[in-house]
């Protein structure tokens, strides 16, 4: 029998889907086409109402593509709204964000009883679910170190669907990374729902301590933090960044708004001055670092002047790329009940403005590296060209053969042809 997995949403879901896949491959065959699968697993997202609709659409589409397949639904949407899934065609198992690693056992139970399984846990006080990945399906491997969030931003449903902050045991993280590195992964990406809050429930061991221990692992070429809050970039973290080149020249730090009144309504834990000052401290220790960010436009009550403040703040910080999200109402959050909801037309226009600004900033950052020698790891080969990313996340395109995939190469950047930096190989990994 065989299976197929659809993954929606964040890098944490991507990691968990890879773990599910590894576990299922002990007894089942993974296929690349859902039409061939006996079981289709859908790992859902619910970060916005739109994400809910995409998840439901994916479940219905899976049934239309393969009416014989049994469907297993897990993740944030099923955690939050399992009642919307129970009666959908061919759905045999519904779980939330606990016990994803038990999906093989749930399948065994269903095969014996032929009865639908719905197993949704209250996540307000649960331990970290132990998961380990031996391999990954891409050049860089994600490692989930933490789950849950206690921030309760006014627009976000995630604390309710992912539960309390909880952390993976450090010795298990180190063992997992060591295995992945020895299996050929040259880059490790630390991921979680609130990554920088790792270890908050431990005695005398936190994110800083974890970074120090990871950086001791032999043969680890690159370490990347998927995302971190500005409030978590402490002086200790800055010192580690300053003194360890294995940590890449890239950090993703969500801004969400460049206007203090909007940040306050979002229940963010900083103001723009704090953010600007911290980025300045970061660039003091890593002058060429790429800082990317998330920004929400059209948050309830955001005036045109508020938006202009955000634009000016972004220019002042000089991000290398902006991920722009038009605010999407999410039932169950405080922001959904706020007055002065912004029209879709205004959100669309503000999104366009920030996307244009993002492209301008990105091209400016890319052009800074013309003439530089940088290391990059090719991820794909197509028609005689290799494509991949440098540590500071420049997207490289060079002539090369597939034998060089997943090997560190030193390249010279000759020009920018957006979205690529065009270069040539000057040294191969020895």
Image (tube, helix red, strand yellow):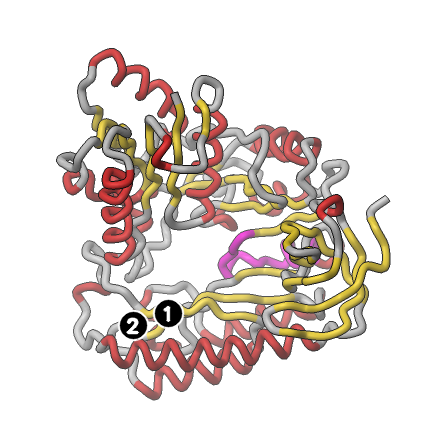
User: Mark 1 Cα within 10 Å, few/some/many (few <14, many 20+)?
Assistant: many
Q: Is residue 157 left or right of residue 286?
A: left
Placement of the C terminus among the 4 image quadrants? top right
Are circles 2 and 1 on residues that touch, CB within 8 Å? yes
Q: CA distance from mark 2 to mark 1?
A: 7 Å
Please report the residue visible at 22 percent of the width from the left and 24 percent of the height from the top.
Answer: 117
Q: Is residue 190 above or below residue 111?
A: below
Local SS, label 1: strand
Placement of the N terminus among the 4 image quadrants? top left
Q: How many marks?
A: 2
Q: Is residue 51 left or right of residue 285?
A: left
Please report the residue visible at 63 percent of the width from the left and 61 percent of the height from the top.
Answer: 393
Q: Which mark is residue 296?
A: 1
Residue 36, by quadrant, is top left
Locate residue 220, reporting x and y percent. Answer: 72, 41
Locate residue 72, reporting x and y percent. Answer: 29, 31
Locate residue 42, reporting x and y percent. Answer: 33, 38
Identify which residue, 21 or 267, lies in the foreground. 21
Instruction: Please report the bounds of the magenta region as a residue range.
Output: 226-241
Q: Is residue 310 above or below residue 71?
A: below
Identify which residue, 85 or 68, lies in the foreground. 68
Q: Is residue 208 above or below residue 260?
A: above
Locate residue 265, reporting x and y percent. Answer: 30, 70
Is 43 covered by the magenta stretch?
no
Residue 244 in sight in this render: no
Please report the residue visible at 45 percent of the width from the left and 29 percent of the height from the top.
Answer: 30
**Residue placed furthest toward the top:** 112
Q: Which mark is residue 299?
A: 2
Residue 199 in sight in this render: yes
Magenta part mainly helix, strand or loop? helix
């Amino acid at each position: 029998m065989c299976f197929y997995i659809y993954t929606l949403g964040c890098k944490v879901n991507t990691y968990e889907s890879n773990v599910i896949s590894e576990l299922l491959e002990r007894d089942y065959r993974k296929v690349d086409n859902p039409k061939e699968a006996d079981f289709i697993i859908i790992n859902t997202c619910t970060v916005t109402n739109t994400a809910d609709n995409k998840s439901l659409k994916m479940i219905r589409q899976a049934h239309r593509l393969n009416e014989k397949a049994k469907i297993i639904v897990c993740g944030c949407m099923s955690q939050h709204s399992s009642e919307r899934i129970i009666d959908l065609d061919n759905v045999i198992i519904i779980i939330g964000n606990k016990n994803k690693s038990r999906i093989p056992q749930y399948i065994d139970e269903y095969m014996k009883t032929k009865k639908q399984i719905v197993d949704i846990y209250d996540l307000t006080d649960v331990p970290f679910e132990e998961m380990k990945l031996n391999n990954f399906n891409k050049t860089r491997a994600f490692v989930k170190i933490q789950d849950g969030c206690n921030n309760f931003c006014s627009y976000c449903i995630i604390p309710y669907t992912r539960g309390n902050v909880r952390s993976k045991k450090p010795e298990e993280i180190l063992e997992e990374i060591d295995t992945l590195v020895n299996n050929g992964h040259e880059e490790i990406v630390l991921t979680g729902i609130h990554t920088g809050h790792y270890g908050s429930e431990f005695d005398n061991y936190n994110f800083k301590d974890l970074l120090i221990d990871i950086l001791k692992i032999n043969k680890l070429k690159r370490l990347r933090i998927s995302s971190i809050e500005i409030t978590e970039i402490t002086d200790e973290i800055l010192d580690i960044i300053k003194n360890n080149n294995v940590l890449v020249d890239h950090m993703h730090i969500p801004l969400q708004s460049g206007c203090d009144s909007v940040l306050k309504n979002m229940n963010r834990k900083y103001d723009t001055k704090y953010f600007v000052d911290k980025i300045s401290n970061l660039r003091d220790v890593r002058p060429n670092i790429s800082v990317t960010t998330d920004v929400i436009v059209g948050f309830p009550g955001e005036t045109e002047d508020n938006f202009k403040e955000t634009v000016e703040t972004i220019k002042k910080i000089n991000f290398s790329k902006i991920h722009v999200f038009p605010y999407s109402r999410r039932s169950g959050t405080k922001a959904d009940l706020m007055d002065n909801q912004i029209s879709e037309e205004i959100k669309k226009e503000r999104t366009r403005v920030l996307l244009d600004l993002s492209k301008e900033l990105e091209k400016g950052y890319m052009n800074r590296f013309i003439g530089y020698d940088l290391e990059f790891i090719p991820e794909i080969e197509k028609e005689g060209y290799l494509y991949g990313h440098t540590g500071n996340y420049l997207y490289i395109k060079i002539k090369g053969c597939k034998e060089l995939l997943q090997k560190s190469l030193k390249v010279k950047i000759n020009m920018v042809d957006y979205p690529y930096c065009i270069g040539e190989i000057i040294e191969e990994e020895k």
